[in-house]
Image (spheres, rainbow, N blue to C red):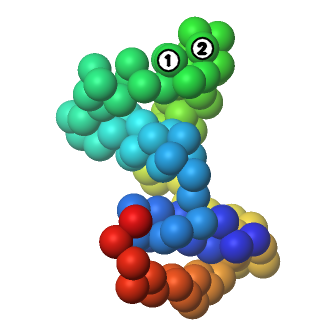
Amino acid sequence: MAKASQVPRWRDSTVFTPLERDVLEYAEGMTNTPPTVTDELSARLLDRLGPAALVELTACIGFANLSTRSNTALGIKSQGFSDACEVPLTARPERSVSTSMA
């Protein structure tokens, strides 16, 4: 739940690993109109995930976008399921302040 509650502010939250941040950036980039995925981001993900996992990730994000955009275009509204299982946004995790210049 801690990570899920931080997704809306993934760029600023300290709970995500560098790979998770890249995946979230990729999902956001694929969702933007027009898409904003860079060659550098794709290369990083390909290197870290491998071809099969990158294709699977892309397909999952693409399917979510297809479903959402299709529902919106057709005027299909939420049936309220998210109201029952909403993940509340938690307080920002406290960051430890270091005085050293490591």
Residue 43 visible within the image = yes
Q: Are marks 1 and 2 in contact (CB under 8 Å)?
A: yes
The crowd level at tag 2 (other Cα within 10 Å; few <14, some 14-19, many 20+) is few
| Amino acid under disc 1 | Leu
Q: Can you say which quadrant of the picture contains the N terminus?
A: bottom right
Q: Which residue lies furthest to the left in this view?
A: 34
> Residue drawn 54% across and 34% down?
61
Residue position marked by numbered label 1 in the rendering: 46
Residue position marked by numbered label 2 in the rendering: 50
| Amino acid under disc 2 | Gly
> Residue drawn 52% across and 84% down?
96
Q: In the image, which disc is placed on residue 2? A: none
Residue 74 visible within the image = no
Q: In this view, does 82 lie to the left or right of 33?
A: right
Q: In this view, does 55 lie to the left or right of 21?
A: right
* In the image, residue 73 above or below residue 94: above
> Residue drawn 39% across and 19% down?
43
